[in-house]
């Protein structure tokens, strides 16, 4: 008994000095990998945006020149503003589809009914597949030579709607945005379902007993729960869309065809930094890094706006 | 509240319509991958009248899809194991180390949730090249582990914090050292959270195109998705082959998903909400 106590005391004393060390040892592997392969490259990218030079390690300091050419160079800036505008259109379509369809599906799925989980499983299916594979399948279906979609339209006497779906500069981007939204609509749906579930049946029932109408219940209880989810969906979509690449690569090549009409910041970044812009197939890493930094700042603005708004909303809700 | 009949009808109509829109491309992919080319063009939606597995044989044996498949499998399993191991042991430290230091590291990790690593690609390329890993499957593993750690630390720290301290005290009195406690107490208790983290990372790692496209050229180092990305250039006219190759990449994920649909939906949604 006595010796047991002493050895326990010794153990504690010994551990006290080595306790910190053990905890640090537990943290170090994760810290190293995360720092070397995530934090460091992101910071270095900002530094690199002030340099120019050929090859993999530009070492010629040029101040803000890369940014200046990105914003004003007659060729580069046209591509940049085009990609920026397209990215906002891409984002806008996602926001519209995901929030309307997501909320619609969620309002159905929030109540239990026969087949409930089958529908949920189906809605989620495209989300688990590779965007590249999804893009290729749809490209085949929209392919005018095969014309799988066109055959359906003809069958239902809507042949007048037939277009060169991916060949028309006016509609290629909306089509691709819709397909991407089709793939990702499951996530907002499930988030809305989770939000709607938190309105307990008792609250709703007691409100109904008090004479509240369905509309009143919707505005009083559901909207305050849905708004923050719309916020999260927006910010997640924003972050995802501003580096989107795969779907454009699959359906319109990395040049955002036709005529750069589907070029996004992600594909533009790939060309400037990695593949090289046509016709000079040589990457410009400095400008690429400047573009990455601008994208980063845009994301940061978006995320901070969301944090600010959601904080404000929470404070108001608590008042 | 009992939903009214018209509401129920609308529910079924809308959801069934959407289900058809979801299944239509997958159906088209699957049935046509078993048809000879002329039937694909003649009748793209019916079941095959003449079944052929040439496309699959072609993809699996004549070209290198079995190789690509093995590479993807290797990269995904090793990356997931490392994310779970490094992430959980770091989360344990952050959750139970009574000091101000881990809080700072926590914020440092969480910051990575909102920043897509793609923006650091150029410098990552430099680092990978300097390490001599460029153009090998090993170039992708550290990148995926770094990408997965923020969500792992975030989800697991929360989970471990909620475990009662008495458990740890009792184990300590029994003479277990800290790594022993991690193995025997922490790991079994956080299994549900580990599966959430694994599922959340599995999908983007298996499906990633960006980093293989930039890091890898050599044929025998390619991942499945990188192999798929080159299909259209190489086999433009062989539709049976293209569709079979697409199916080979899609089916394993689909089967895994359908077998564990509940866990997948929970994992992907929870991860996204936390992100």
Image (cartoon, coloured by chain):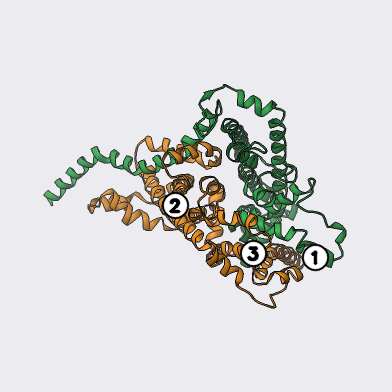
Chain colours: A green, B orange
Crowding at dot 1, Cα within 10 Å, few <14 / some 14-19 / many 20+, comes out as some
Under circle 2, the secondary element is helix
Cα separation between marks 1 and 2: 44 Å
Label 3, on which residue?
Answer: B243
Instruction: Name the spot of residue A74 as percent of width and height, x first.
Output: 72, 28
Crowding at dot 2, Cα within 10 Å, few <14 / some 14-19 / many 20+, comes out as many
Under circle 3, the secondary element is helix
Label 1, on which residue?
Answer: A151
Task: Identify the residue at horizontal 50%, vertical 61% (top origin).
Answer: B69
The reply to whether label 2 and label 3 mark residues of one chain is yes
Chain letter of disc 1 in the image: A
Q: Quadrant of residue A269?
A: top right
Q: Is residue A34 visible?
A: yes
Q: From the viewer's perspective, is residue A284 above or below residue A199? A: above
Q: Nearer the viewer, mark 1 or mark 3?
A: 3
Cα separation between marks 1 and 3: 19 Å
Q: Would residue A16 be found to the left or right of residue B229 on screen?
A: left
């Amino acid at each position: 008994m006595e010796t047991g106590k002493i050895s326990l005391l010794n153990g504690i004393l010994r551990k006290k000095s080595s306790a910190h060390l053990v905890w640090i040892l537990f943290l170090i592997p994760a810290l190293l990998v995360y720092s070397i392969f995530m934090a460091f490259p992101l910071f270095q990218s900002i530094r690199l945006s002030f340099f120019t030079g050929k090859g993999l390690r530009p070492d010629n300091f040029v101040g803000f020149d890369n940014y200046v050419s990105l914003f004003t160079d007659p060729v580069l800036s046209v591509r940049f503003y085009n990609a920026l505008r397209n990215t906002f259109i891409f984002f806008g379509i996602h926001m519209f589809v995901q929030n309307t369809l997501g909320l619609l599906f969620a309002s159905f799925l929030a109540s239990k009914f026969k087949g409930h989980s089958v529908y949920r499983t189906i809605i989620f299916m495209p989300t688990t597949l590779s965007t590249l594979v999804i893009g290729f399948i749809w490209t085949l279906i929209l392919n005018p030579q095969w014309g799988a979609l066109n055959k359906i339209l003809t069958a239902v006497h809507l042949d007048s709607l037939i277009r060169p779906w991916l060949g028309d500069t006016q509609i290629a981007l909306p089509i691709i945005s819709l397909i991407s939204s089709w793939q990702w609509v499951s996530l907002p749906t499930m988030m809305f379902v989770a939000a709607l579930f938190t309105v307990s049946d008792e609250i709703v029932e007691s409100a109904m007993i008090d004479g509240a109408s369905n509309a009143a219940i919707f505005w009083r209880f559901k909207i305050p729960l849905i708004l923050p989810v719309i916020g999260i969906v927006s910010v997640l979509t924003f972050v995802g869309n501003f580096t989107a690449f795969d779907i454009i690569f699959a359906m319109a090549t990395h040049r955002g065809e036709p005529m750069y009409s589907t070029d996004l910041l992600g594909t533009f970044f790939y060309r400037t930094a990695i593949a090289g812009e046509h016709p000079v197939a040589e990457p410009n890493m400095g400008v690429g890094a400047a573009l990455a930094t601008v994208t980063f700042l845009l994301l940061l603005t978006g995320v901070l706006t969301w944090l600010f708004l959601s904080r404000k909303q929470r404070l108001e809700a608590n008042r | 509240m009992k939903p009214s009949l018209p509401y129920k009808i609308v529910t079924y109509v809308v959801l069934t319509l959407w289900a058809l829109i979801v299944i239509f491309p997958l159906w088209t992919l699957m049935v046509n991958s078993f048809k000879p080319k002329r039937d694909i063009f003649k009748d793209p939606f019916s079941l095959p009248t003449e079944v052929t597995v040439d496309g699959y044989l072609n993809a699996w044996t004549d070209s290198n899809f079995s190789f690509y498949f093995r590479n993807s499998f290797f990269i995904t399993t090793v990356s997931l194991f490392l994310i779970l191991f490094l992430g959980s042991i770091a989360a344990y430290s952050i959750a139970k180390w009574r000091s101000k230091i881990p809080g700072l590291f926590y914020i440092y990790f969480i910051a990575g949730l909102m920043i897509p690593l793609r923006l650091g690609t150029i410098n990552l390329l430099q680092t990978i090249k300097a390490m001599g890993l460029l153009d090998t499957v090993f170039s992708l593993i550290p990148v995926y582990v770094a990408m997965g750690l923020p969500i792992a630390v975030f989800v697991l720290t929360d989970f471990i914090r909620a475990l009662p301290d008495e458990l740890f005290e009792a184990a300590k009195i029994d003479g277990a050292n800290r790594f022993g406690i991690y193995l025997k107490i922490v790991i079994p208790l956080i299994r549900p959270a580990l599966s959430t983290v694994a599922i959340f990372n599995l999908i983007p790692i298996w499906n990633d195109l960006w980093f293989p496209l930039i890091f890898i050229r050599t044929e025998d180092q390619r991942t499945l998705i990188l192999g798929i990305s080159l299909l259209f250039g190489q086999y433009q006219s062989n539709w049976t082959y293209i569709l079979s190759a697409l199916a080979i990449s899609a089916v394993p994920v689909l089967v895994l998903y359908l077998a564990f649909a509940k866990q997948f939906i929970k994992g992907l949604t929870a991860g996204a909400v936390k992100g």
